[in-house]
Image (cartoon, rainbow, N blue to C red):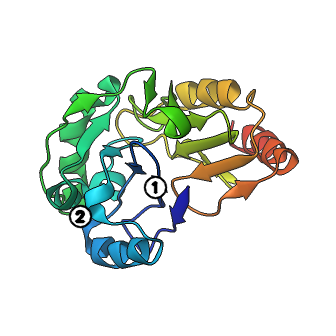
Amino acid sequence: MYWYPERGLGDCNMYVVEGDPTILVDPGSPRYLEGRLREMKKDGLEPEGIEIIVNTHSHPDHCGANRPLQELSGAKIMIHRGEGDHLRFSLEFGRYFGMEVPRFEVDAYLGEKVGGGETELLVLHTPGHSPGSVSLYHAGLRLLLCGDLVFEGGVGRTDFPGGSSEELLASLERISDLHLQYLLPGHGNVLRGEERIRRNFEFVKGHFF
């Protein structure tokens, strides 16, 4: 598992799960893709080795680099079916914030899991930030890639169209029952340790709802 921290405005944390297949989660902004590829190369990862691109949701800071990365890698792009209708709005909404996103096509919708063997990730539908937001759970590592559901000391915004505070809280309640060792959010720091993650869930549920 590799973490490539967000690099600036309109970007997000990017993660790569290396294996068979190798999965890249949320490539972020196209503005930073070249630098990201250099970082990956230092870790022994080449774009041609990426087989699946998964978006935790369709906001432009998470999916902006989908098409240029796909052109380099030939990877399939996957999102949750619940995000399909929201995708067009998300890309148009990005223009409002000055983020131009190269158009891309979704190759397949996520099912109950993605990958296999050591890279198998369970797909958990966690709406609230957007209708089709997902979190990805690796059972062996007790690790959750949670997109913009929850961060260190915060939660994803729900004031964008398609957001829902009620759904976000319900998603948090389900996820907080997992005994996690690693929480990998779409922005900010990675959280390590079951107790630290538990305290973070208690904090955000107590201060934001």
Which comes sooner in the sequence, label 2 or label 1?
A: 1
Q: Residue at x 33, y 48 (%)?
A: 59
147, above or below 44, in the image:
above
Q: Amino acid at mark 1?
A: Val
- The C terminus lies in which quarter of the figure? top right
Bin the neighbour count of mark 2 within 10 Å (Cα to Cα): few under 14, some 14-19, many 20 and up: some
What is the secondary structure assignment of the residue under circle 2?
loop
In this picture, residue 39 sits left or right of residue 88: right
Q: Position of residue 27 (x, y in %)?
A: 35, 58
Q: Position of residue 23 (x, y in %)?
A: 40, 47
In this picture, residue 84 sits left or right of residue 158: left
Q: Residue at x 76, y 55 (%)?
A: 192
- State the residue in front, 204 or 3: 3
- Where residue 85 sits, quadrant-wise, is top left
- State the residue in front, 124 or 129: 124
Tally of marks? 2
Instruction: Return the residue at label 2.
Output: 99
- Where residue 31 sits, quadrant-wise, is bottom left
What is the secondary structure assignment of the residue under circle 1?
strand
Q: Residue at x 32, y 66 (%)?
A: 46
Q: Amino acid at mark 2?
A: Met
- State the residue in front, 101 or 107: 107
- State the residue in front, 166 or 9: 9
58, above or below 99, in the image:
above
104, above or below 37, in the image:
above
- Nearer to us: label 2 or label 1: 1
Q: Position of residue 52 (x, y in %)?
A: 32, 44
Instruction: Return the residue at label 1.
Output: 16
Give the distance between the C-alpha atoms of the residues marked 2 and 1, in whole angstroms: 24 Å
Q: Position of residue 176 (x, y in %)?
A: 73, 32
